[in-house]
């Protein structure tokens, strides 16, 4: 199984809503990532978890809150988002983050109204 | 200046043509990735290279570490190859083994 799954596929939320994005992998990978991708732009790294600990936070606003409940799951909690946060949110995983292939999920298309 | 430069930005080809996409980078790297993204879709990792050449089906990726350059070749191109191809590098050294620096992508359109 070389799959990273993400739910939901699409999400529309208002600026006062609280929602969560979920990511799951069963490849035994110990590094998991959140990326944000705007249209026609490359992905931008948001967070990296390594062995269930937050390893990198790329100065992401606190309205995005990551959580890694266990080695297979990665959540991104959203609260009080702005319309400019509308984007494709991609999850990825890799074996341990050194010279490793990152496997990407299909993404969640988020629209903030 | 982006640390990873891709060329061309856009490429249109006829079905069956041989295609080359280039990637140049300016930093020391531990690995280079070629990724594929179909419109509106997720990203598929095609290759990870640290030296030499890799082949998978009709796709070939090469890297020249001394020249800081990599190429992705597609033989016998097909309309289903139409996608954005992204080069990404993992810098060598420092604490950020996890971080990829992405090129801006090459939009490939293969016409039947």
Image: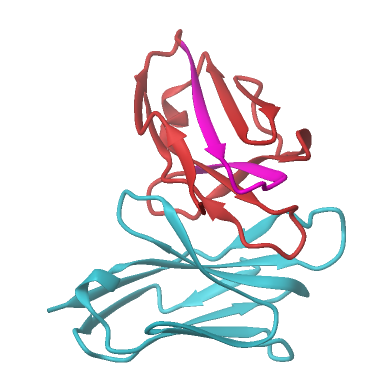
Chain colours: A red, B cyan
Question: Could you tell me if residue A16 is visible in this image?
Answer: yes
Residue depicted at 69% across the width and 62% down the height:
A100
Residue A113 colored magenta?
no
Q: Position of residue A12 (x, y in %)?
A: 34, 22
Q: Which residues are magenta?
A: A18-36
Q: Position of residue B23 (x, y in %)?
A: 55, 79
Q: Is residue B104 above or below residue B96?
A: below
Work out which residue is located at the far front of the displayed protein and give it: A1
Is residue A53 or residue B6 the one in the foreground? A53
Image quadrant assignment for residue B89: bottom right
Q: Main secondary structure of the magenta part?
A: strand
Q: Horizontal placement of B110 versus B40: left or right?
A: left
Q: Horizontal placement of A44 versus B15: left or right?
A: right
Image quadrant assignment for residue A99: bottom right
Residue depicted at 71% across the width and 86% down the height:
B65
Work out which residue is located at the far right of the displayed protein and give it: B94
Question: Could you tell me if residue B1 is visible in this image?
Answer: no
Q: Is residue A58 above or below residue B6?
A: above
Q: Is residue A87 above or below residue B18?
A: above
Q: Horizontal placement of B52 versus A21: left or right?
A: right
Q: Position of residue A74 (x, y in %)?
A: 61, 31
**Quarter placement of the C terminus of chain A:** top left
Residue A23 colored magenta?
yes
Q: Position of residue A14 (x, y in %)?
A: 38, 13
Is residue A49 or residue A56 the one in the foreground? A49
Image quadrant assignment for residue A49: top right
């Amino acid at each position: 199984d070389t799959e990273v799954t993400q739910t939901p596929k699409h999400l529309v939320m208002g600026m006062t809503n609280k929602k969560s994005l979920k990511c799951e992998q069963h490849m035994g990978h110990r590094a998991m990532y959140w990326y944000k991708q705007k249209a026609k732009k490359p992905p931008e790294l948001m967070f990296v978890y390594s062995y269930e600990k937050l390893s990198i936070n790329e100065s992401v606003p606190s309205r995005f809150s990551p959580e890694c409940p266990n080695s297979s799951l990665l959540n991104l909690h959203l609260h009080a988002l702005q319309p400019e946060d509308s984007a494709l949110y991609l999850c990825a995983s890799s074996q341990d983050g050194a010279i490793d292939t990152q496997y990407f999920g299909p993404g969640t298309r988020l629209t903030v109204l | 200046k982006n640390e990873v430069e891709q060329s061309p930005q856009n490429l249109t080809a006829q079905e069956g043509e041989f295609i080359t996409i280039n990637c140049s980078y300016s930093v020391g790297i531990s690995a280079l990735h070629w990724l594929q993204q179909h419109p509106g879709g997720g990203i598929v990792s095609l290759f990870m290279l640290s030296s030499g050449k890799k082949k998978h089906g009709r796709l070939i990726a090469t890297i020249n570490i001394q020249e800081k350059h990599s190429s992705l070749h597609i033989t016998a191109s097909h309309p289903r190859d139409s996608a954005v191809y992204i080069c990404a590098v993992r810098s060598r050294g420092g604490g950020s083994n996890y971080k990829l620096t992405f090129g801006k992508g090459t939009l490939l359109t293969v016409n039947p």
